[in-house]
Image (tube, rainbow, N blue to C red):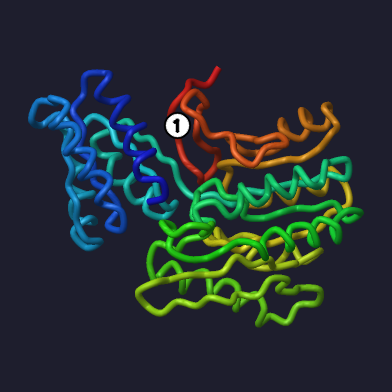
Amino acid sequence: MEFPCCHGHKKAGAAIAAGCSVINAPSEDTPLVSLYMAKLAIEAGFPPGLFNVIPSDIENKRIIGKMLCEDPSIAALSFTGSTPVGKVLSKQCADTVKRVHLELGGNAPLIVFESADIDRAVDGAMLAKFRNAGQACNAANRMLIHKSIYAQFVEKLAAKVAKLKVGNGLDKGVSVGPLVNTKAYKKVTSIVDGTLALNTTNVDMITENQVTSDGDHPFYSPAILSCQENNDLPIFHEEIFGPVATLFSFDTEAEAVEMANNTRYGLQAYIFTKDLSQSWRVSENLEYGMVAVNEGAISSANNPFGGWKESGIGREAGHLV
């Protein structure tokens, strides 16, 4: 799970404030944060049984998850993770008619219109794509750039990406850490290599991957894949979940909106424009739960967080109004 501390606090805090006890079943890749939260809860004087943690490996997690979903004494389920797993949990909760909150996968578009401040758009793209090594459900997965500024945007973005340093996140100067595990590294590598193997015209790797996984440390160097008009590529519809920016071009506003909505996901979108009326018009036409305007990040404690379509059900943090 990306941002395990953030997600854990948002879910558990709201439930406990409402007078409910909580069972936290953390990702097998990030259990330590949840265990430390339990330690802090004990130190803070929480009564036994109020905040509970069940760490496990992936095989046992399937058993535990099914048991929790089907137990009639549990009133609600909140899950952050992949869309396929979210669908399974939702089905398992159906027999007991549980309240279900799902925050699932994303395929976020980042749209840069002709009027945009290109430098601001590039800075926003760097934040939206490369924070946490691209491992975020709301990471900018597809960058849609107006044809008239496409070459300029690519040049400026490549210059920024080239300055990123890959390594141990605790080391000074490092800006991109490892992927969560070797499986994640293999997935990103497979998606990129598969796209390049298609030998499609006008698809280029602008920034080469210089760092490879050694098995124990799955590092993947930030990369830019320029796809221009090739929005029929499989990578257009896949959540990369790694530090790879894919760039596509468009001609008109209507084309950009159509491209952005051409996905089964609908978590978050980003748009960059100086035209205020365009920002409102496009935001209303995008099929996404959240839209960032001229910003690379909008998550905060008071913003409702959640998506449309197969990106989930319900909202965390603030209320919809």
Q: Quadrant of residue 200?
A: bottom right
Residue 165 drawn at (x, y percent): 56, 63
Q: Secondary structure at mark 1?
A: loop
Q: Quadrant of residue 273?
A: top right
Is residue 69 visible to us here? no
Up-down relation of residue 278 to residue 263 (above or below): above
* Residue under the point 32% across and 47% down: 89
The foreground one among 114 and 160 is 160
Q: Residue furthest front?
A: 172
Residue 136 drawn at (x, y percent): 50, 50
Q: Is residue 133 left or right of residue 123?
A: left
The foreground one among 152 and 100 is 152
Up-down relation of residue 217 to residue 18 (above or below): below
Residue 277 drawn at (x, y percent): 84, 27
Up-down relation of residue 74 to residue 233 (above or below): above
Is residue 45 visible to us here? yes
Total labels drawn: 1
* Residue under the point 62% across and 50% down: 140
Q: Is residue 77 left or right of residue 181?
A: left
* Residue under the point 28% across and 25% down: 15
Residue that numbered label 1 is attached to: 314
Q: Is residue 231 left or right of residue 128?
A: right
Q: Residue furthest left?
A: 48
Q: Is residue 251 left or right of residue 8?
A: right
Please name the amino acid that badge 1 sits on.
Answer: Gly
